[in-house]
Amino acid sequence: MAYHTTTVRDTALTLPVIASVRATLSRVAVLLTLVAISLLLFLATGVQAGAELRDTGTHVVGQGETLWEIAATHTSPGGDVRATLYDIQKLNGIDGSVIHAGTALVVPGG
């Protein structure tokens, strides 16, 4: 029966190779994880953006008109005026309820 003897020299050459392979596998695992997370974020953003796509129209603010009145005008029967008001704020980047006469607002529902 023949035995293989391992010399210190063989072991010294093998350890750096094993360490290099492990490091490469670790890098690949991290890269695949980042790709998977990026893909999930991309898909989640696409679903969220797709949910926001709907018909919109324009409403020019009249003198003395309030955001609530505009939202009520563009809310479907039985709908929630608060939700429409929120949508108008979001569509136009309005923080609060201050609007000015003559301003063209994007409103839901064309």
Image: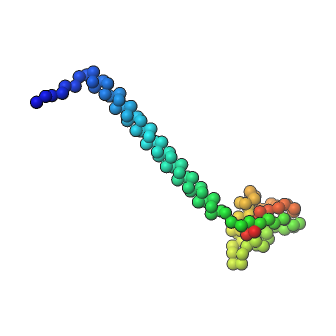
Residue 31 percent coordinates (x, y): 48, 42
36 is higher (above) or lower (below) than 85? above
In this rendering, does residue 85 appear at all? no
Quick one: 18 or 99, which is closer to the camera? 18
At horizontal 69% and vertical 78% (from top left) the residue drawn is 78
Q: Quadrant of residue 69?
A: bottom right
Residue 81 percent coordinates (x, y): 72, 71
At horizontal 73% and vertical 69% (from top left) the residue drawn is 109
Q: Is residue 104 left or right of residue 75?
A: right
38 is higher (above) or lower (below) than 96? above
Q: Quadrant of the N terminus?
A: top left
At horizontal 57% and vertical 52% (from top left) the residue drawn is 42
Q: Quadrant of residue 52?
A: bottom right
Q: Quadrant of the C terminus?
A: bottom right
Q: Work out which residue is located at the far top of the displayed protein and give it.
A: 9
Q: Is residue 2 left or right of residue 39?
A: left
Q: Is residue 65 left or right of residue 37?
A: right
Q: Work out which residue is located at the far bottom of the displayed protein and give it.
A: 77
Residue 5 percent coordinates (x, y): 19, 25
27 is higher (above) or lower (below) than 10? below
Residue 49 percent coordinates (x, y): 63, 59
Q: Is residue 60 left or right of residue 83?
A: right
